[in-house]
Each structure stands twice: as structure tokens, then as C-alpha cells.
Amino acid sequence: LVLDVLLRLGNQQKRFFRSKMNLFEALLALLSLIETIITEIDLPLPFFRLMRPVFRGVRLIRILTRTLGKSADYIRELRHHVSGDRVRYTQSGYDLDLAYITSQVIAMSSPCSGVQALFGNPATELAHFFNTKHPNKYLIVNLTDKLDYPPELFNYRILQFPIGQHG
């Protein structure tokens, strides 16, 4: 951690101090150094013994903060991996597994909700897309035999036409 912070400080220089995460990690690096010195000296002071769990807790907070900050990136990468080489719509802040075949026909994977939304097109994002980009001018034709998303999101503009296993 200390080496990482020092390298970023050397690389970013004044910009390093603009990021709250960088400042937080610099504080953690300092606390880690203090903990190492205290551990090496092995001072019998009760205060320093009480501080060890605090230092470890702060390290855990750093790890969680870093991980949570990147969760959106992880989910995006996961969705790209699942969609494979299919074209994705990545305009206007959307990142959806859909493609315009013509100006009036769109091919897409089925809308997902719950845990499945981590891998596929979240139904809420698709609904926002259709209700914003094509208000009252769309019909979703679901070719699967199940409807795993709330149809009210799409104003019940869904035609169920199961054709069995496809893909």
C-alpha cells in the first residue's frame, strides 16, 4: 500500500491531492507504517494494542471502498462477456445488448430482473430506453416461453410468442 501510494504521488504529483480516495489511502499508508513500527518495537503500551484492530478495520474499509467503487465496472465487463460478439447499444449513457436492424426493428436479448439483471439487459434500463427513445411507439415480441420481468415497465406493450429453444 505504501509503495502504491508513493508511486501514484510521484506520477500524479499535485493531482494526487485532489482525490479523496488518494488522501484516504495516504492516511492508511501512514497508519500502516505506524502499525509496522509499533509491531517491530513491540511496545507493551495498552493504547497501541488497542489500535491494532482499528488499523485492520481501516484497511478493510479501504478494500471495501475500492471494490464497491469498481462494482459498476465489473458488472459492465460481465455483461459484455455474456453478450459475446453481439453488437451493444452504447449511446446516450446506455449499455444494452440490443441492435437496430432497421430504424423500426430492434433485436435484443430478453429483459431481465433480479439477479439475472447482472448478466443481461436489466428490465428497468430497457424500459427507460424504450419509453424515452420510442415513447408509445414500440412493441416487444417475446419469443421465449417465459416472462421474467414486470410487463408494466413496458406499459404492457408485450406480445408473447414462444417458439421454443432458440439462440
Image: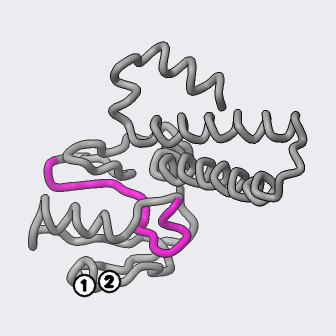
Q: Which mark is residue 78?
A: none
Q: Residue at x 80, y 40 (%)?
A: 38
The image shows residue 116 at horizontal and vertical percentages of 54, 68
Q: Tag 2: residue type?
A: Pro
Q: Toward the viewer: 49 or 153?
A: 49
Left or right position of 63 against 138: right
- Amino acid at dot 1: Tyr
Residue at the extreme left: 136
Which of 130 and 105 lies nearest the eye of the viewer?
A: 130
- Does 161 appear in magenta? no
Mark 1: few, some, or many residues within 10 Å (few <14, many ≥20)?
A: few
Q: Are marks 1 and 2 in contact (CB under 8 Å)?
A: yes
Q: Quadrant of the N terminus?
A: top right
In the rendered view, would you say 117 is above or below 106?
A: below
Q: Position of residue 140 (x, y in %)?
A: 28, 70
Q: Secondary structure at mark 2?
A: helix
Residue occupying the point 87% across, 35% down: 41
Please name the residue that numbered disc 2 is placed on. Answer: 151
Counting the numbered discs, the total is 2
- Residue at 15%, 55% in the rendered image: 104
Asked if residue 148 is positioned above or below residue 130 in the image, the reply reads below
Q: Is residue 142 at all visible to an observer of this figure?
A: yes
Return the x and y of residue 51 as percentages of the image width and height: 73, 55
Marks 1 and 2, how far apart at CA: 5 Å
Numbered mark located on residue 156 in the image:
1
| Mark 1 or mark 2: whose residue is earlier in sequence | 2
Quadrant for residue 64, please give it: bottom right
Magenta stretch encompasses residue 109: yes
Q: Is 107 left or right of 67, judged from the image as shown?
A: left
Q: Position of residue 144 (x, y in %)?
A: 48, 72
Depth order, front residue of 131/38: 38
Magenta region, residue range: 103-118
